[in-house]
Every structure is written in C-alpha cells, then in structure tokens.
Amino acid sequence: MTAHALAPPFSETQWRRIHTLLEELDDQQALWLSGYLAGQNTDTARLGQKPEDAPALLIAYGTETDNSRELAERFSEQCREAGVAAEVQDLARVRPRQLVKRKHLVVITATHGDGDPPEPALPFFEGLADDATAPRLKGLHFAVLALGDSTYEHFCTAGRQLDARLEALGGQRLLERQECDVDFEAPAKAWLARLIEKLPKRESNTAPAASTSATKRGPVYDKRRPLEAEILVNQCLTAPDRTSPIHHLELALEAPDFAVAPGDAVGVLADNPPELIAAVLDATGLSGEQPVTVDGAPQPLVQALRQHRDLTIPGGRFLEYWAELTESAALREAVAGGTRTQRAVLKQHQVLDLLRDYPARPDAEALVASLRPLQPRLYDLANALSAFDDELHLTVKRFRYPFAGRWETGVASAYLLDLQAGDSVRLYPHRNARFHLPDDPDTPLVLIAEGTGIAPYRAFLQHLAAAGRHTPCWLVFAEQRFEEDFLYQLDFQEARDNGLLKRVDTVFQAEQPGRELADPLLEQVDRLSEWLERGAHLYFCGDKDRLAEAEARVRDAVDRRLGAGHWKQLSKAKRLHRNLY
C-alpha cells in the first residue's frame, strides 16, 4: 500500500485540530468518541461504495423533533432482521436525482407550521417540486408515512404533497399513504409491518447484512430514557412584573455521555400542573390511585395524568370517545361532520372544558387511552460544555396565549419557571446539526435573534472563547427594553471586550416604536455585503413569524446589492441557518 493511500482525508488545519482534541481526551472520552463515530450514518461510512452496490431500499426521513428519525431507524432494524437490505438517510442529505438509482423508497416525514416540511428537508421538497429539474421516477416503488398534528389545519400536508409528487413523477406506491397524529406509535407500527411484507428479501441462504442505519448508535438518553437533572439556579432575567418573563435555568450535568454541542437543544419532559390534574380527577369522579397502563407499564392514574397524557389539547380520539360516552348530540354531530367540524369544536374546547360542559363518569383505562400523549418541549442549549462541562443552561420564556376568551399558560414553560433549586427535571439531548458552527474557524458569523433566540449564541461565543478561536461575530438582537430585557448583557459585553464579538446592534421595541429586527442590517447593507463576500454564515433564531419577516427583508436587500439569486446561492452553500419556533 502506498503512502498516498494512507494519507488522512483532512486539511492541515483540520488535522491539527483533531490532534489537539485527542490530546485533551481521557481514556473514557476517547472510547466513547470512537464508538460514536463508528456508528455515524454518514457518507464517509460508504466511501468506495459503487452506486449499484447501494441497498435496494432507501428509508428517508424528514424531522425537526426526531420522531421520524427514530421510526426510520427502528424500521431499518426490522428490515435487517427480515433480510431486507436498507439504508437510512436524512432528507436533508438526499438530492432528488439520487432517487433515479433507487428501486424502493420509504419516506417518513413530519409536517410543521402551516403545512411546511421540516426545515432541513426543505431543499429536497423544493427540488422535487421543480418541474425543470425533478427526475422522472419510473420504476421507483415508494411508500409515505406522514406524521402531523390534527389540531392544525394543514394536518400531514408535507406527507400528502410528497406522496402525490412521487406518483406524478412516475413512482408506483407500495402501500397507500399512512397519516398519523401525535399518538403515532401504534398506527405507524401496524403500517410498517404491512409494508415490510412488500419489500424485496434476500435469498434465504444469504445472511442478513448489517444495517447502515444508526440504530445501534442511538443516544444514551432519549424520550424513553431521559436523564434526571437537578435544578441549581432559576433566575428571572427580565422585569419580574413582565407578563411573559424570561428565566435563566442552570441544571447539574453529572452524565459525561450527554451528547450536546452549541446549537443543539434539550428535550424537556414536563409535568402537568397539580391543579389541572386535580380538576380533571374532580370532573371525572376518578381516584388518582386507580391502576392504569401506559405503553405497557402499570401505574396509578395520577402518574399517567401527570407525566404521560396531554390534559390541554383534546384531539380527535378523545372527542370521539367523549361523544360516545356522554351521548351528546352536539359532540356526535361534530364527530360525524369530519375533520373540519371536529377541529372547529376543538379550537373552542380544551380537555377540561369538555369534561365540565359534557359531564360523564369514564373508565380510567379508557380515559388514558383516549388522551393524546404529552409531548416533550425543546429548549436551546444556552451554554457550551467546553466552558461548563458539568452544567446545562436553558433560557425559558413563560408562554401565554388567548383561548376561548381567556388567557392560558403553556404547560412546559410554567413547569420550568416554577421549579426551585433542588428540584429535578427529566430531559434528553436533541441534535440540531443544521444550526452548528461552521468548521472553518475564520468564517465570520452574523447572529440574528429575537428574545430567547439569543440563547444558542451565548453557547456559540462560550465555545469559541474556550477553543481560542478568533471567529469574527456580529450580533443583532431585539427585545423590549434595554434596562430590563437585554438578556445575558454581561456575557456579550465580555465577548465584545475580548474582541470576539466585533459588532452588537440592538432593537428595543418598546423604546424604539416602529423599529424592527432587520433594520440594523438594512442600514448597514454595505457592511453586511462585505461580510458575506468574506464567506459569512447567517443564523436566524427566535419566533418564526418575526424571524421570517426579518429574513425576507434582508434577503431582498442582499439580492439588490449583490445580484438577484444571491440569497438562494447562500442557501445552497449551507450558509443560512434557521432555528425557528
């Protein structure tokens, strides 16, 4: 073997950084890292593989919360056991023209917002929708599993559109599309079991090959196996009398294998508030000590209501169950009217409203089975473990929303903001690779945030400082008032004093009426253009509507300054990063 063949596939700068990192790791850390990299589902694991050697089945997923990924990886393992050669890929890494070389495709995708595909998968959806460039897929056999939330008007729209588009391009369905609500586990499992019977198997005398999915790698902690972390600090960062205060939480991290990086999030498994649980028990006449079963685990009803069931949003299954139990003509009419009519009723009623307006005495087990699962909430990591390796920092805003003539508070934010030092919370790491820092330490960063969207930028700057990187950064931040709402002001002032943060532009809207988040960038479009020409990456984090509006204005200004289509090229070059909620 020649020396050239042994040369590492890294640049000199990358090679130096790898050696520096390895020298800092102890034996346990090095062992964990080697196992993590060995299981990564990346293209490097398939170097040298010819296109014709690719597994017959591609399982592609689109996700922002990891539900689709977890289903894809579990299905890949089932395929391996059944003798089906399968490969798992994120739709963010799939180009539409690659489908031409495939014979079988299974897509598991969620829908977000107003019928949008998951943000990382958006280029795939757009490429497939473009008649000028989309490939003809005659000979491709496909199936689509669509995940969504039926309380939204555009339920499973992304999956429906993809299913129709694959057929329009010449693909043939293996199985009719399956649409799943938030309680997707049972219907998804049944549909995948039917699907696997329609997939090509290896010859019986051929041993199943190892799946290329990351199933074996799986995270040490996840929704089913969360970490319990102790609250160290719960501090209000804004004026205490503010309607929606923002808190800074510090949690003890005693798990060295809790894999999160700056830009990642933490999934929090919140408990329902005690007063809501008591109200539900009172309205149903049930005892909290009655035994029930949740996902095969026996437990008292009060625990199921506290940790496992959504006591706010009813959902279609609960509406059907309650209509049958109460024999209410109004509820039966809503159920018979279809999805649109049901959604209209659900928009005016939470679970407790239905329990009180249409009283009945349910069976405890049936009640638990009819309620939606309580969903985890994602919060951006506000610190870098390279700076604080035994703590997790979160930035949480109390979420309030109008409902049926009254104001309600979000379950997760209320739960977190009420925790005291010494309390514990269940959580797990959530990887957000599309929002990580670029590899090149000299790449300029433009960090645009509104409200709690500033949290990951605090982690970015901590990481850059700890690594000794001199990455030029420009922060643009919007909140209400300078004195009360400049979140983490001292942290960013220190980064400015150290020369890491080159520019800080703020918009405090209560003190500057009419001024918007995008205005500082528009007023300095020449400077912004210069940063972009130096290869800058742009990050957008915060409220989806406000950040989308800011991006649209900046996009138009950049295209006018640097030429039409420049913004689109930035997106194709993966220099635009969005973390919106």
Image (cartoon, rainbow, N blue to C red):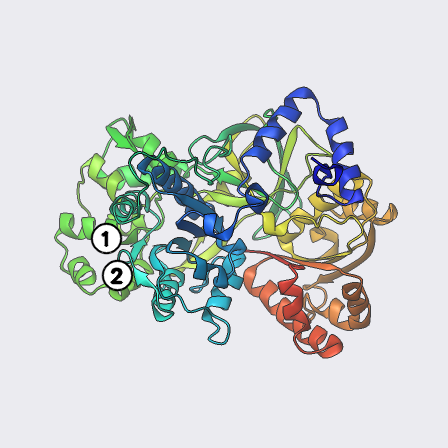
Q: CA distance from mark 1 to mark 2?
A: 8 Å
What SS does tag 2 mark?
helix
Q: Is residue 423 above or below residue 201?
A: above
Quadrant of the drawing holding the N terminus: top right
Specify the amino acid type for callout 2. Answer: Gln
The local crowd at label 1, few if under 14, some if 14 to 19, many if 20 or more residues have their Cα within 10 Å, is many
Q: Is residue 560 above or below residue 475?
A: below
Q: Is residue 567 above or below residue 61?
A: below
Q: Nearer the viewer, residue 469 or 390?
A: 469
**First along the sequence among labels 1 and 2:** 1
Q: Mark 2 sits on what residue?
A: 342
Q: Residue at x 26, y 56 (%)?
A: 175
x%, y% of residue 361?
17, 41
Q: Residue at x 53, y 55 (%)?
A: 92
Q: Residue at x 19, y 58 (%)?
A: 331
x%, y% of residue 223?
44, 36
The reply to whether dot 1 and dot 2 touch (C-beta < 8 Å) is: yes
Q: Is residue 167 above or below residue 246?
A: below
Q: Nearer the viewer, residue 445 or 457?
A: 445
x%, y% of residue 246?
61, 47
Q: Mark 1 sits on what residue?
A: 319
Specify the amino acid type for callout 1. Answer: Leu
Q: Is residue 324 visible to the viewer in this orientation of the structure?
A: yes
Q: Is residue 374 visible to the viewer in this orientation of the structure?
A: no
x%, y% of residue 492?
78, 48
